[in-house]
Amino acid sequence: MKTRPLAGPVALAAAVALAATACGGSGDPVTSGGPEKVTVWIMKDSVTDAFLARFRSGFEAEHQDIDLDIQIQEWDGIGERVTAALASKDAPDVIEVGNTQVAQYAASGGVRDLSEKTTELNGADWLPGLAEPGKVDGRQYGIPWYAANRVVIYHKDLFAEAGVTAPPKTQAEWLAATAKLDRGATQGIYLPGQNWYTLSGFVWEEGGDLAVQDGTRWKGALDTPQALAGMDFYRKLQALGKGPKDSDEAKPPQAEVFAKGDVAQIIAVPGGAKIVEEINPALKGKLGFFPVPGKSAEKPGAVFTGGSDLIVPEASTHPEAAYEVVRALAGEKWQTDMAKTMSYVPNRTSLARVIQDDEGTAAMAAGAAQGRATPNSPQWAAVEATNPIKQYMTAVLTGTDPARAAATASQSITKTLGS
């Protein structure tokens, strides 16, 4: 991800003993006979300082020839800093990047191809929403680290009052239940009109996409029958509440709306429930979670997967040691620790078992198995900057012919991706 639209982890305290805040690389000379100093860039608020402390001490105990220099990076301006580092001769050895950023960085030619390591790293078991954007032109540059995705957070009392006795498992059941919930002063669901990440999942569930690659070029695909079907489902669901048609979940903050107690459901990461409870403590213990339903009950619906991958710059002066860091962070021991510490989804589907006791994270993990990421074009960030998808959604929800609005949005996406 370019930013953290999904994962709202615990704020990371200043990593005093662990990390320098400077953006130095790994080119410091190694004292003869001493350990290699491996520089690792970790993004602010990704993990707690306690996790990093455990990882550093544990890793160095097992790799006494490696000295970790963990440096915390701010998200603001990170794209320019990573791009500059990849082009330099003094790059860090390991960098955490948003999963949808890998293609952009790999296009620079400064990221090491780790394809030959995928078997050793259990790549066949990786979450697709992390693995696929880490692969560019058939080569694996990004190694999945952790994931987060949206689930449905629901008000248990309102479900009981409406006679909805169990969370829905299909889209048809979801619409029917939400219609029952949408009565009197209660909104069946609060779904803003421009929640395009949620729309993406509905489009993927229908077999469509936001954009597709045609040879060496990318083109917008919102005007396909499958993508239009996804938008039609969004329209039906959005109508069962009072969400604004011309703004997203941040305007107004949907947690504040949900906290008033008259909304039956929102679509958000599980951590959103904690924010709601902080705003309205009376809701503590009254919120539940279920995966976004799919077309059939056999599996949850497709969802956008946000999170992070790990890359090794070509300019790393310690590539073998850097890989050992990546292997450890992506391995079962530290994946389990991080999942329990941060309530993240581990990078492997088989590790979902480690968070089954946490209702919200378990629902998120179930959805993550059907996770996807945005189109793997180096230019996708430019699409998000102007975001014709949001404009398209508002147009449809306010009465514009869907096919015509989709064609306009697709043309805009095609033009941007071709620039």
Image (cartoon, rainbow, N blue to C red):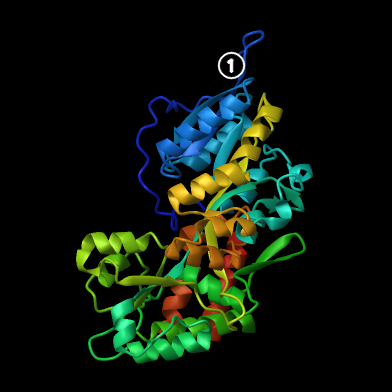
Place residue 253 in its image quadrant: bottom left
Dot 1: element: loop
Residue identifier under label 1? 28
Count of numbered circles in the view: 1
User: Is residue 401 something one can see in this rendering?
Assistant: no
On the image, the x and y values in percent for residue 32 come to: 66, 8
Q: Nearer the viewer, residue 130 or 374?
A: 130
Q: Label 1: how many residues lie within 10 Å, few (<14), some (14-19) or many (20+)?
A: few
Which residue extends farthest front? Answer: 357
On the image, the x and y values in percent for residue 37 come to: 59, 21
The vertical placement of 308 against 228, above or below, is above
Which residue extends farthest top? Answer: 32
On the image, the x and y values in percent for residue 408 come to: 54, 76
What residue type is disc 1 on? Asp
The vertical placement of 176 against 54, above or below, is below
Q: Residue at x 62, y 21 (%)?
A: 64
Does residue 17 appear left or right of residue 127 in this picture?
left
The vertical placement of 312 against 65, above or below, is below
- Location of the C terminus (image quadrant): bottom right
